[in-house]
Amino acid sequence: VFPEESRDMVMRLATWNFDRKLVVLSDLDQDKSPSMVYLNCCPFWVRIYDLPLNLRVKRVAQTIANTIPQFMEWNKNEQNRLGRFVRV
């Protein structure tokens, strides 16, 4: 129904909401019944505030992020950034 690049962008840029409610999306395998697709996980960016500049490296961000149930990704652009927070 939608061009593949549009679908990929929507999936990559999750998290989505509608009417202030979380919308959880998942790829649907053609061999699987929709009732068998588990919609119980949604990625979020988490902000870590007031982290000293010399600690804004992947190793430190990952150590902090590992306190979250499942660390997925570190934003490479955050290293030594002068902003107020680091996103993981």
Image (cartoon, helix red, strand yellow):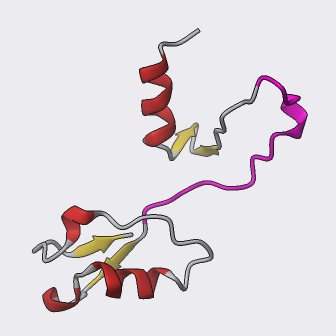
Q: Nearer the viewer, residue 56 or 83?
A: 56
Q: Residue at x 43, y 69 (%)?
A: 46
Q: Residue at x 15, y 71 (%)?
A: 83
Q: Nearer the viewer, residue 31 or 63?
A: 31
Position of residue 87 measured from the top left corner of the image (x, y, whole percent): 33, 68
Q: Residue at x 51, y 37 (%)?
A: 11
Q: Is residue 61 left or right of residue 42?
A: left
Q: Is residue 9 above or below residue 50?
A: above
Q: Residue furthest front?
A: 31
40 part of magenta stretch: yes
Specify start and end residues of the magenta stretch as a single range.
30-45
Q: Residue furthest left?
A: 82
- Secondary structure mostly seen in the magenta stretch: loop
Q: Is residue 30 left or right of residue 17?
A: right
Position of residue 36 measured from the top left corner of the image (x, y, whole percent): 88, 39
Q: Nearer the viewer, residue 20 or 6?
A: 6
Q: Is residue 38 left or right of residue 41?
A: right
41 part of magenta stretch: yes
Position of residue 50 measured from the top left corner of the image (x, y, whole percent): 24, 86
Quarter of the image with the N terminus in it:
top right
Q: Is residue 24 left or right of residue 88?
A: right
Q: Count of labels shown?
A: 0
When asked about the image quadrant of residue 56, the answer is: bottom left
Q: Is residue 22 above or below residue 44?
A: above
Q: Residue at x 81, y 40 (%)?
A: 37
When asked about the image quadrant of residue 25, the answer is: top right
Q: Residue furthest top?
A: 1
Quarter of the image with the C terminus in it:
bottom left
Position of residue 79 measured from the top left corner of the image (x, y, whole percent): 19, 73
